Amino acid sequence: MDLRLEPRLREIVERLGSGPRLHTITVAEARAASVTRRSLLQRPSEAVRRVEDLAVPTGAGPLRARLYAPRDGAPVLLYLHGGAWVLGDLDGPDHLCRALANASRCAVLSLDYPLAPEHPFPAAAEAAYETACWLAAGGSVAGRGVGIAVGGDSAGANLAAAVALMSRDRGGPPLRSQLLLFPPTDANAPRSAADEQQPLLTAAEMSWGWRHYLGRPEDGDHPYASPLRADTRGVASAIIVTAEHDVLRAEGDAYAARLRAAGVAVRHRSYPGMVHGFLGLFGELPAARRALDDVAEALRDALAD
């Protein structure tokens, strides 16, 4: 596929795409490769007024989390990392969470949710929902009544959408917004031949993640796994980011349209010339920094008192 990427982005894509593809290796190998891949990026670590590692109590036991608080009494974004539900930890999105906290003036709580295949659907979504409830109850992060949003990138965005649905269905915390960066929204989304050649994430790699995440193939029909199949009336307002050269673009665009059709307020922007996960490249790509600032402004507006 001959993609018209700006030279700097093309160089980054070639650098990051030099390793083995997810669907050709084992889970253990994929996890090791994801750590190696981080070292290939410029990851600016901004100072934040308060950074603290915490333990969040859940029914499945305590989960590790990391709080980034730029000021006291700030509203909180519960952030869920990407990684095809199989990869990732608190260190992966650390640079992004720091920058997002500073730019939005909102606290960010990054959750180390249980990974598949050891913990298949709906374990990660349930853990994220429990964490949102803990935050709403005061937790050790925010006082009662402080605005709460849920968000994430890629697989984490899928989990964030599930938490928004759960909160509506179960009378849970009244979320101010859901921040969905490159969200997968349908386990059985149709794929084209071009999707197999998308940079950084291909259709085959996305299928690899779904296979590990879903305990049973039929779980892909559940709206908490595939939000595009859900009745979305009454869920939290949404901030959605999609990228032109991303295998998940159509799913994110379709979910934005579905939310709007259900009367949900949506701020959706699809970035031309960009690739999956490009927001995390803000240390090397000026366009990614501008997009991060756009997201921070939208989040600040959504969480404003």
Image (cartoon, grey):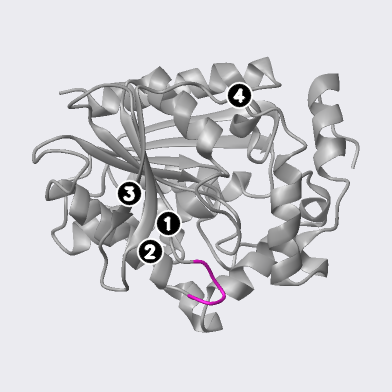
Q: Nearer the viewer, mark 3 or mark 1?
A: 3
Q: Earlier in the sequence, mark 4 or mark 1?
A: 4
Disc 3 secondary structure class: strand
Disc 4 secondary structure class: loop
Q: Which residue is mark 1?
A: 159
Q: Nearer the viewer, mark 2 or mark 3?
A: 3
Q: Which residue is mark 2?
A: 125
Q: Which residue is mark 4?
A: 44
Q: Mark 2 and mark 4 in contact? Answer it, CB < 8 Å.
A: no
Q: Residue at x 52, y 48 (%)?
A: 183
Q: Which kind of residue does numbered mark 4 sit on? A: Pro
State the separation of the CA atoms marked 4 and 1: 26 Å
Residue 206, horizontal then vertical, whole percent:
67, 61
Q: Mark 3 and mark 1 in contact? Answer it, CB < 8 Å.
A: no
Q: Nearer the viewer, mark 4 or mark 3?
A: 3
Q: Nearer the viewer, mark 2 or mark 4?
A: 4
Disc 1 secondary structure class: helix
Q: Which residue is mark 3?
A: 54
State the separation of the CA atoms marked 2 and 1: 5 Å
State the separation of the CA atoms marked 4 and 3: 23 Å
Q: Earlier in the sequence, mark 3 or mark 1?
A: 3
Residue 177 is inside the magenta segment: no
Q: Nearer the viewer, residue 187 or 15?
A: 15
Disc 2 secondary structure class: helix
Give the quarter of the figure containing the N terminus: top right
